[in-house]
Image (spheres, grey):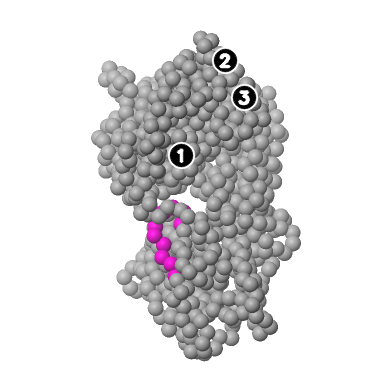
Amino acid sequence: MRTQGSGELLRRPRSVNVIAGVFGRNPRVSLEGRLGFSHHLPASQISLSGGGRPATFGFLARMETAGKMPGGSPFTVAGAPRGRCEAIGDIGATKFSTFDTRSSTRDRRGRRRLNFDLNLINSSLVPYILVSLPLSGQRGGGEPAPHFTMSNHYDKNLSESRKSDAEQQRQKKLVLVGSSAALLLLLVVGAVATSNYQNDESDSNISTKTMHSSSKSVKMLCSATDYTHACEVSLSKAVKSDTDDPKILLKAAVTVVLDEVSKGFAHSKLLQSNDSRVRGAVEDCQAMYENSKIEINATIQTIIDHGIDNLPHRSHDMRTWLSAVMAYQETCIDGFPEGELKTKMRHAMTGAKELTSNALAIIGQASSFLSLINPSRRLLSAEEELALSAPKKNGFPSWVSKSDRRMLRGARHRPNLAFPPNVTVAKDGSGDFTTINQAMDAIPKNRNRTIRYVIYVKQGIYDEQVNFTRNYENILMYGDGATKSIITGNHNNVDGTRTFHTPPFVVAANGFVGIAMGFRNTAGPAKHQAVAARVQADSVVFLNCRFEAYQDTLYAHSHRQFYRGCVITGTVDFIFGDGTAVFQNCLLVVRRPLDNQQNIITAQGRTDHRETSGFVFQNCRIKADKRLLDTSRPPIRSYLARPWKSYSKTIFMESHIEDFIDPAGYLPWDGDFGLNTLYYAEFNNYGPGANGTARVKWPGFHVIGKQEAMRYTVESFIQGSSWIRESGTPVRLGLSSA
């Protein structure tokens, strides 16, 4: 929908602070207009845009209401008074309209007036600007649809001529009709956006009001969150003096998370028991606490190091780190055996989970708004997404040069030619070391971690526990083939090892790349949980690798991960965790479990809808191992997913699904747990098992269209255009179908 309005360009600009929804001194531009709509937009965006240099003008309007909606809610917009720019959304799936200040006019008193449009865009993208305000109206007539009236908040003594002009503009509105709506407006960044002007004349005749109260700033900051009371209480204590400094406010929103996380994890030490499982869980909780501190401190440091208008560039990073903190909290809880102690630990972690969720909300929405006043933050347009989704020669993206394609083709078949190794591991003694752990110990502690360190693992079965901890950043390890160079082990849950510690291969080092390697747990189906690999690091890539086990094969624990051309085999929940992972051109082989079990490919573990995590399978093949189809044995049902946690998120798109997958597609975890809050989606799948007519009818299951599917491409979901490209891995950034 579109609404129009106008604003006056004042002659004596000075510094303008958009704070707590109120201008500072001497607003250069005052605007007024009307926004009217009633339209069904369950997950919509408002696009507000302006022209010229970023962060050079701002305006605030107060919403006055008509129809059925809450009133008196302020909102803030920012833009620039010269030139033209476009508002940018989370991904390039929607084209945003602009208003152009070059089309400003002069009113009858000779003052310049800025003509502008506000555009409400109906899309299925995630909420873009804060604070959902429920509206109601009727489709096709009936009672009048609710609308917003934007009025000048600063100069209450508008002349009659200005009022007349404004009224004429306000009559130009378009109302879209629907059954219900959610208008998402950013309140908080009214408290964090700053615009500056040079003073060229005296401002003695201009009087404005400011509201620089920390309590009001905190309320606006917290209005975006799900746990508003916890947010306001914690931030009111953290922000002890009146402030409108955006860094102080945003930093405080994350700092309080660290304080509460410390309390939550500390509680685990109080849970005394002679049970070795409990003692082990306490140890894991302390390790998760250390990981959480690193992620939270990285978020705080990012806020400190970057200007407020540059935060959109780091929004995905910060939200990824805080989503990992959520995963660490849940891992701590999951480590305790079922019973009273686990219940106590979950209760103790409640405050930490609430404040982490709040920080995710604040940073996500604040950064989205800040992109409006920082047009240099360029995301892909819809046309660019379409271009990226077009078929590529030899499976490589169009941006890969001919020489790079030759190198990458070599990397897939002879990685040693593309990546000269720093060290070579060979069981037969022909390399520098005979074990992978020896090679890891030899890596210089003071090396330049921005330069990739390469380990070549020759053909052989390496029965050892390989753990790339955080200190091993930017490592590339490649082998002679996924069925030739294999890391193996057999630790399992039945024999007393906690699931978290069963894998023979663990990656906690950011920037890890694995090529042509195999990872195997040989415990077998009778041993239940037995992980082959656990991945809990950011910007991790696996190319042409094989993950082989039965139950819980691949633990995609946390952070952004990319799997290309990999084979993953298993039975029950064999791809699980709370990571943000895309599996592209992979083969998922479903094996035969115990006769009393059912196969489930994925069990994604998102616990909060603010998290960035989820699993995406694009252009994959889902097939059955021949033993699974043995007609001489009892039939086994197989499913695509079940919700391990309440906000489980999994998308299958452009993939081939065989008919051994149950027509329902998905299996409940326990009754109706998570069925209303999960997000499962399918797009353009094919094959005999892809018929969606008999799929579950859960509220959380969706057959989606192309526009929404674009949210789950490599570019959009894991921001893979840079870090995957740097790894030398072929990747399709968009959709396969044009």
The amino acid pointed to by label 2 is: Phe
The circle on residue 510 is: none
Mark sitting earlier along the chain (1/2) = 2
Tell which circle, 1 or 3, labels the residue nearer the N-terminal end. Answer: 3
Task: Look at mark 3 in the image and give the residue it sits on.
Answer: 443
Query: How would you classify the magenta stretch by its main secondary structure?
Result: loop
Q: Secondary structure at mark 3?
A: loop
Left or right: residue 638 compared with residue 30: left
Look at the picture and state if 34 lies above or below 679: below
- Kindly identify which numbered label has been placed on residue 433: 2
Q: Are marks 3 and 2 in contact (CB under 8 Å)?
A: no
Quarter of the figure with residue 309: bottom right
User: As shown in the figure, which amino acid type bears the numbered disc 3?
Assistant: Ile
Q: Residues within 10 Å of mark 3 (few under 14, many from 20)?
A: some
Which residue is located at x 52 percent, y 84 percent? 111
Mark 2 lies on a secondary structure that is: loop
Q: Is-magenta flag for residue 96?
A: yes
x then y, percent, for residue 413:
39, 24
Residue 688 visible in the shown view: yes
Residue at 33 percent across and 73 percent down: it is 141
To which residue does mark 1 refer? Answer: 725
Q: Are marks 1 and 3 in contact (CB under 8 Å)?
A: no
Span colored in magenta = 89-99
Question: From mark 1 to mark 3, how far is it between C-alphas?
Answer: 25 Å
Give whichever of discs 3 and 2 has the lower sequence position. 2
> Regarding mark 1 in the picture, which secondary structure is present there?
helix
